[in-house]
Amino acid sequence: MLWRLFLVTILGAGLYAQTERGNITGAVSDPSGAAVPGAAVAIVHVATNTAMNVQTTRAGEYNAPNLMPGVYRVEITADGFKRFIQDRVTVTAAATVRLDVRLQVGQVSETVEVSSSVVQIQTENAKVTTAVQNKLVDELPLVVGGEMRSPFGLVTITPEARGGGSNLSLGGGQARAWDATLDGLSTTTNRSADAVEIAYIAPSLEAITEFAVDTNGFKAEYGQAGGGVMTFSSKSGTNMLHGSAYEFLRNEKFDAAGYFANATARTPGSGRAVYKQHDFGATVGGPVVLPKIYDGRNRTFFFVGYEGFRNRVGANDLILSVPAPEMYQGDFSRLVNANNQPLTIYDPASTRPNPSGSGFIRDPFPTNQIPRGKFSPAANRIIQSARDLGGELRPNAPTAVPGTIGYLRQNYVSTGGSIVTPTDKGSLKIDHALSDNHRLSFFRNQTSFRREIGPGGPRGLPLPYYSGAQVQAFDTTAYRMNYDWAISPRMLNHFSIGGNTFFKNSFSPNSGKDWKDKVCIRNVVDCNVNFPHIQFTEFTKWGDTTYNGTEQPMWAMKDDLSYIRGSHTFKFGYAFQSQRANGFGQQDISGRADFSFLGTSVPGATSNTSGSSFASFLLGEANLGRTETVRFVAQLYRYHGFYVQDDWRVNRRLTFNFGVRYEFTKPP
C-alpha cells in the first residue's frame, strides 16, 4: 500500500487543498562560503509593512512559508556582519522563491542593499507551474460576451489549458478532472470541475490578485484530482487607500450588420438584433482607520469589490409549428402531410378487432371533423386558459396561406423576445495582525445570477404556451478564514477553514402562478404549481417542466505545519472536505401528457399517413402521462487526506522532495 502511495506522490497524480501561499527560502553564508547559523531573517510585505521573522539553522538554511502573494523585502542580520537588504522579491501564488545570501564582514549598523529583482526560477521543486501575476490579471482584456467576465477566461492563456467552459482540461488530463482553489480551499462543486459553475463561486476578476496553474511534479501535500490545479488568491488591502471603477459597454448600435442579418432585420435596413450589455463595478481597499478610535496601518486591512452585469439580448427568428385555427373547433378537413396528401382522422373510441382476424380497425370521422361533444374536458380547459392568458395561436408565417402545406407545417415565426441575465457579485476581505506571531484573514464572496424573460417577451411561443429556455436562479457564497501562527522562528502553522454554497434552480416561467382554478389535469399531484406540460409529435410543445435543481454546500478545513531543522524542511498536514450534492425537483408535479398521431391513425400504422397529434389531444387520447411528487435526493461525500514530506537540501545544486500521502473518500 505504501509503495503505491509513494509512487502516486512521485508522479504527481493529483491535487487537493493546495494553498495559495508561497515560500521564500535560501541559505546564508559568510565570505568563505561557510554557513551562518542563528542569523535573523525578516520577510517584510512591502504593501502592508507586516513582517515574518525566522532564523537560519545550523546549516545556514532558512525558510519562510505561508506567505501571501505579493512583493517582499528580505532583511538579514547577524553579529559581525553587515546588514543585508534585498528589495523586490516577488512571491506568486503557490510558488517558492530561493534567495541565497553571502554576508559581508562588518558592523550591523552598516547595510548592503540590493534592489534588483530576484530571478524566479523554480529550483526547489519539480512541479510545472504557470503563474499569472497581478499585473496580467489587472490589465489583460477579457471579452464580455453574454456573461460576466470570468477569471477562467485568463486560464486559457496558459500553455497547459485546453478547451474552455465545461470542457476545460489541464495538463493533458480529462475535461473536468482538475481542481481549483480559492485562498487554499476547493471551489469545485458536485465532485467534478466545471469552469462555468465555479465562475459563480469565484469573486470578481477585480478582487483576484493572481493565480497559478500547476500540472505536474506535485509534492505529497497535494492530492485528489488529476490533470492540474488552479490556485487563486483574493486581493487584500494595503497601507495605501486605493480603488477602481469600470464599465464595459456593448450595444448593437456599435456593431456592423452580419452577412445574413438583413434577412431577419427588426427594422428595415437595420440588420441588427437587440444587444445591450453592461459589465460594471468598483473596488476599494486600504487600512482600517477609524479617526480618533483606531489606526490600522501596518495591522488591519480591508478590500471590498462589487461587479454587476446587465444585458438584454434579442432572439434570432424561430420557425415553429402551431395548429391551424379551425383545428381548435375539431375541423381537420384541410389536414395534409408533408407531401400534400390528405390525412384521415380516425375515432379511437371505435377501435375493434378486424373481422378478417388481422389486427384492429377504426372508423374515420365523417368529413374529417371531430364533434365538439367528444372533446376532452381537460383539453377544453387547457385551450381556454391558454387563450385567456396568451391569446390564440395562429399561423403567421408568410407561407401560412390556407390551403397550402405551409399552413400546417412550420407556420409560426417568432420575431421578438429577449433574455436577460442580471448578475451581481460582492466580496469582502479583512486581514489583521493580532501580533508579530499571529495573523488572521477572512474572505467572503456572494453571487446572484438570474436568467429571465426580458421586456420583449419570451423567445418562441407566448406565455403560457412558451417552452423555450427555462428561467434560472443561481445563488452562491464562498467564505474562508486563515490563521497563521509563528510558533517559533523555525516552526510555523497555517490553518484554513471555510466552504462554498451553490444553489441552482431551473424552472418554467409558468411556475408558481396559482393554476388550479384555471386548468387542472385530473389525478396529478398538485395542479396549482404549473401550467400542464403538453407535447405533440407534429407541433411545438406547450409549456415545460417546473422546478429542478441542486444544493451543493461544501465545507472544508486543513492544517499545515512547517518545521525547519538543519538542511531539512519538514511539512505535515491534514485536510478534510464535506461535499453535498442534493438534487431536488418537482418537474411534472402538475402533469405531463404526450400526444401522437398514432392515437387517431389507422391502428398499427407507424408512418404519418393518417391521424394527428392535435386531434388526439382534443380527444384526450394521450400516449404518455406523467406526474411526480416532490423529489429530494441527498448525497454526501466526505474526504480525508494526511501527508508528511521533507525537502532536503543536500547541497547548493541538489534538493530532494520526498513524502508520503494517504487519502480516501468515503462512499456517498
Image (cartoon, rainbow, N blue to C red):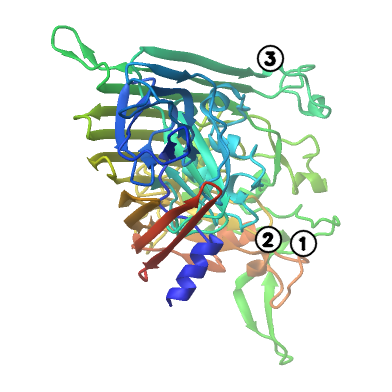
Q: Residue shown at 43%/37% (left/top)?
A: 29
The residue that label 2 is drawn on is: 612
The residue that label 1 is drawn on is: 343
For marks 3 and 1, give the CA distance. Answer: 49 Å
Dot 2 or dot 1: first in sequence order is 1
User: Looking at the rendering, in which quadrant would you find the C terminus?
Assistant: bottom left
Query: Residue 11: which numbered mark, if any?
Result: none
Dot 3 or dot 2: first in sequence order is 3
Query: Element under label 1?
Result: loop
- Residue 266 drawn at (x, y percent): 71, 22
Please tell me whether residue 114 is drawn above or below residue 527 in the rendered image. Answer: above
Residue type highlighted by circle 1: Leu
* In this view, the mark in front (3 or 1): 3
Dots 3, 1 in contact, CB < 8 A = no
User: Looking at the rendering, in which quadrant would you find the N terminus?
Assistant: bottom left
Residue type highlighted by circle 2: Ser
Please tell me whether residue 213 is drawn above or below residue 340 in the rendered image. Answer: above
For marks 2 and 1, give the CA distance. Answer: 8 Å
Q: Badge 1: few (under 14), some or many (20 or more) residues near its Cα, within 10 Å? A: some
- Residue 381 drawn at (x, y percent): 46, 50
Q: Is residue 318 left or right of residue 73?
A: right
Q: Residue shown at 52%/61% (left/top)?
A: 593
- Residue 543 drawn at (x, y percent): 52, 48
Q: Nearer the viewer, residue 225 or 367?
A: 225
Q: Residue shown at 41%/57% (left/top)?
A: 646
In the rendered image, the residue lying farthest to the bottom is 357
Dots 2, 1 in contact, CB < 8 A = yes
Residue 470 in sight here: no
In the rendered image, the residue lying farthest to the left is 293
The residue that label 3 is drawn on is: 253
